Image (cartoon, rainbow, N blue to C red):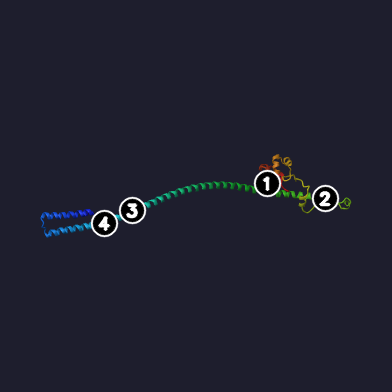
Amino acid sequence: MKILSRDEEVHMIRWVAITLMMTVGLSGCMVSKSKYEASVSDMEAAKAELEKGRMHQEALEEQIRNLKGLNEKISTDLEMMTSEVQRIKEGRSNEQTLLETRERELDQEKEQLISKLRVISSQYQKVKAQNDTLKKTVLRYKNELKDSHASTEPSTGRASGERMASTATTSQPEASKPKVAAPAPSKIVMPSKPMAPTIATSPTVPKIATGLVNINQASVSDLVLTLGLSREVAEEVVSNRPYRLRGELVAKNVIPKATFDEIKGRITAAP
């Protein structure tokens, strides 16, 4: 059903009134009661229909206004949701960029740590090999030192006994020598044990004992003439004293290992 506006309703009422007037005019001044009542009834029905249409129109207009408000609210919510979705997308993009950057940094740090680990492992292997070599060298030097002490102790004890015997003989007065029996000095001069303190404090200990060159006491000239070292190497040996073991010549990088192997049988580091 078509909805009429206010002006259309007024125009329709006027048209109905004009129609009634024309009907009355055409039929004369006298109108039958039935026709009049029918016309009035039609006019009332038209008014009721118009009122009903107006109410329906107002309801539709109210519904349209509600729909417009709802549409505006939905549009606002849609814009907010669209902006939120865009913000989430941008946040995800930024997070993805940060994650990729951090991943590259971690990869670089991993490569650096792997390189450092390789260097440290290589250094550890070198130090371990040097340590093993040094342990073997020290053990060999200890054994050689024990053998050297074992070979030098008897000769040292005999020298100490001879010095003590000569000292006892010279300390007696000239007048008392004839009174002393001849076997008496022989009982005093041979001690039962070596006199190590007497040897250490005696000023007459030679620098080269039992044919070995003492690297802690020999001069540069002695090292050159006896061992055949160059003067530069001999001076290096003297400048790096003292030595607890012969092997410290190699441990301190004073002489090469090959040179040490040639002279180690002719040197000693005993005090």
Amino acid type at image mark 1: Glu
Tell me the residue that label 2 is attached to: 167
Q: Position of residue 80 (x, y in %)?
A: 38, 52
Q: Position of residue 42 (x, y in %)?
A: 16, 58
Tell me the residue that label 4 is attached to: 58
Tell me the residue that label 3 is attached to: 72
Q: Are marks 1 and 4 in contact (CB under 8 Å)?
A: no
Alpha-carbon distance for marks 2 and 3?
A: 131 Å
Question: Quick one: label 3 or label 4, which is nearer the N terminus?
Answer: 4
Q: Nearer the viewer, residue 34 or 129?
A: 34
Q: Nearer the viewer, residue 4 or 205?
A: 4
Q: On screen, 138 above or below 55?
A: above
Alpha-carbon distance for marks 2 and 4?
A: 150 Å
Image quarter hosting the N terminus? bottom left
Alpha-carbon distance for marks 1 and 2?
A: 38 Å
Amino acid type at image mark 4: Glu
* Neighbours of disc 3 within 10 Å: few (<14), some (14-19), many (20+): few
Pick out the residue farthest to the front. Answer: 29
